[in-house]
Image (cartoon, rainbow, N blue to C red):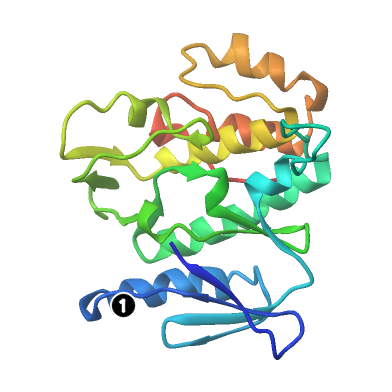
Amino acid sequence: MLKLIKHDLVDNKYSLSLSLKREEEDTNIIFLKSIHESCLLSGSSIHGNTISFYASSIQTLKDFCFTPFSISNAERCRKKCSYNTAIHLACSLSKQQQYLEHYGYSFYGIHLSDILVIDGCRFVNINFEMCKEFDLVSSSITLYSPFTRSELCFFSPEMLASRHLPASLHYKTYYYSLGLLSLYCLFGECVDCVDCVDCVIVDILKPIVGTKLYFFILRMLETNPEDRRMIFV
């Protein structure tokens, strides 16, 4: 996970730093560039294993989606994102994924705490550990260690169905995760493995039927990974 640092001496300046072994430097740079060259941060620059940038506000998507705790209300209340905010989320995370894919890498899942919300309108995935290189011939990611599943994690059905290691998954397994995340942020619906998209997810999407975001989400939630598309048109 990238470490977020606030520079006290410079107003609104932050850094994201990643410590890796020397043999992983190339992978490190690709990951940092997926943020920098996708224009997800304002005034960003890379120095070694650190990317610096400017922002007025930063919070995790988990904090963005829930109201803070208060003395009078011990429970955090769920907030839904606006349609425009959901578009910003989908487009930001798609840009980062597309950059990674160009160099043969892909995320394989999402947790709300992995996503930083910059100035309320830009979104960045900082979980380096959930990004793996995929085979360019088979288009598959190979996982050699167990993954942790929690309440606010979003994984594809084929990911959740994996019972043995190593596990081989199509790199577009991430598309399903991003589709589920978009669905959750927009409607507050946390959908697990759904066998029938038409009778469950399409019903949830009725309020935005026919919109660009509607078709974007449906393209990513195809059952067959090879049929998934990350296209916003």
On the image, the x and y values in percent for residue 163 come to 21, 26
Q: Left or right? Give the position of 43 relative to 52.
A: right
Q: How many marks?
A: 1
Q: Residue at x 60, y 46 (%)?
A: 231
Mark 1, other Cα within 10 Å: few <14 / some 14–19 / many ≥20: few
Q: Residue furthest top?
A: 199
Task: Judge whether 225 appears above or below 198 on screen.
Answer: below
On the image, the x and y values in percent for residue 96 come to 54, 61
Front in this rendered view, residue 210 or 50: 50
Q: Residue at x 78, y 47 (%)?
A: 85
Figure quadrant of the N terminus: bottom left
Amino acid at pointer 1: Asp
On the image, the x and y values in percent for residue 222 come to 50, 27
Figure quadrant of the C terminus: top right
Task: Judge whether 189 appears above or below 21 on screen.
Answer: above
Instruction: State the residue position of label 1.
Output: 26
Task: Judge whether 12 appears above or below 214 on screen.
Answer: below
Q: Residue at x 55, y 49 (%)?
A: 113
Q: Is residue 120 visible?
A: yes
Front in this rendered view, residue 216 or 25: 25
On the image, the x and y values in percent for residue 186 come to 74, 34
